[in-house]
Image: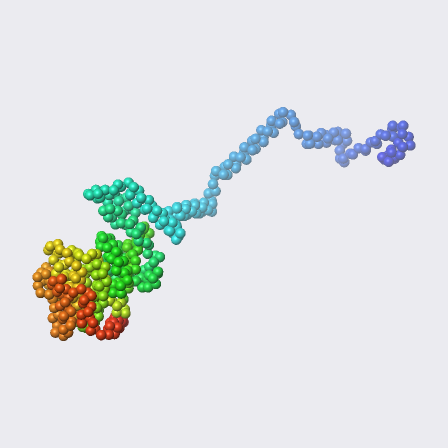
Amino acid sequence: MQEITTEDVIVAQQENPSDETCLEKPEEPERIEPGSGNVEENSEDLDAEICQELEPDNSWYAICMREEEEMVRNDEEGLTVIDEELEPDNSWYAMCMREEAEFQNEEESLTVVNEELEPDNSWYAMCMREEAEFQNEEESLTVVNEEVPETSGNDTSSREIELSVNINQQAPIYLDDKEDNTYQFVETYPAPWKYVKLLKALGEGRFGVLHKGWHLVRNRQVTIEIIKDMQDEEKILQEIEILEMVYGHDNIIKFHGAYYHKASRRTTTNTGLWIAMEMCAGGSVYDLMGTKKQYSLGERWISYICREVLQGLCHLQKLKIIHHDLKPENLMLTKYGDVKIVNFEHATIGEKSDSSAGTVCYMAPEALGCLRKSAEYDYKADIWSLGITAIAMAQGYPPYSNEPEKRVIKKIIFGQAPVLTWDRWSDTFHSFVDKCLQKNPNKRPTAEKLLLHPFITDIGDVKGVKWCISKHLEMTQESQL
């Protein structure tokens, strides 16, 4: 049988377009699988299976069953995941890892706590804290001054107590009957850092520790005394006032300024009032006596020192200032042999004074008389002290130095005037001492008249004597090294 193809149909249609039989699609031959018995039954069963596989059961019951199976499957999977999350891994490795993680967390928490507790010690942070403390102290001072009214009489003690309660807890201060002196010093005297530089300590001074220093403005070496205890505040402030008045004379120690270093919680060393003075590297005349045999200076050296002291006393007398405590310890020497009057602690301002301050062995009779009865005397009391100083430089010690103080006072007031006891001294030296130690102050000459005395004028080569003293000081210091 000959097969009819599609091309044959198209050709036949074109030849006989009215013939509909030609349009029919030829039937495909049936495919019969080998081994099958009934061809028609096998094909029907195969079609049914294919339809069942391709088309799901969309009945209501089938849909519900599928949803229920899916829910059960999801629940089982979720429970399995939860069980895995809740039940930790108890293996040895997992336990070690967990312990190590806990240890690291503890270290991090401790580090955070330490960072919070430990302050920032950088230079900037410390400066900021100090600035904050200073501002708090100023605010507390302002509050106290506003709250405490001005009082008089016995009411000042209550103000002192309130100041000590409110302020003394923040910084060490010194209280006065009228006002907080620390605040006064801060306002009056500048901080020292811009003016002087502190160097090594030299020893104890009259009110505090002596230091070697360098004046940054005047470009010279100075001596700095740091005063912490301000109990003698009135004397210290009066001495500063006098030093400012007498500044400029060659035979009086030069004052190079007062400064105040305020204490704070961070810095407590070298706090207090700084007084900068001229450096006298040669020591005192008393020290010079200690370098000589029998503590006795030569007559020419004594003449030179008395001449320099008299020039300084002339300057003090013009300013109406009485020193009250001239003695070898208060006469300083520079390394070049210059003589300087120092220590104006007991000095007074005015033509007359009734002060009984000074060193008993060197005090004039009229000054010691103030211990018994109040009386006034003038600057000639310093001339008496110079005469006793001359005896001490000659014989190594002042008169009556080994006797009790009461007996010394009685001998000076009622006894004869002291004299030189050694035979080797010249008549001019005896005359000079006699002039200085006149019991009647009206017969005692002034400093200007004593500068004309032969003991002073006959000294000869003043520069030569000064050079000898400076060389002796230099050799003494080299031998001590």
Is there any visible trace of residue 65 in the rendered image? yes
Q: Nearer the viewer, residue 479 or 378?
A: 378
Residue drawn at the location 29% of the way across and 41% of the way down: 146
User: Is 396 placed above or below 373 here?
Assistant: below
Residue sticking out furthest to the top = 60
Q: Is residue 42 above or below residue 217?
A: above
Q: How many marks?
A: 0
Determine whether, in the image, residue 26 is placed left or right of residue 193.
right
Quarter of the image where the N terminus is located: top right
Q: How is the image coloured?
A: rainbow
Q: Looking at the picture, tell me which residue is in the foreground, 163 or 18.
A: 163
Q: Residue at x 33, y 52 (%)?
A: 266
State which quarter of the image contains the C terminus.
bottom left
Any part of residue 398 in sight: no
Who's the residue at 53% across and 35% down the image? Answer: 78
Is residue 148 or residue 13 the one in the foreground?
148
Could you say where residue 84 lies in the image, as x and y percent from the top left?
Answer: 50, 39
Picture coordinates of residue 447, whole percent (x, y): 19, 65
Residue at x 26% of width, y 54% of height: 228
x, y percent for residue 59: 64, 25
Percent coordinates x, y for residue 97 in the rendering = 46, 46
Q: Quadrant of residue 464?
A: bottom left
Q: Residue furthest right?
A: 15
Q: Is residue 105 left or right of residue 43?
A: left
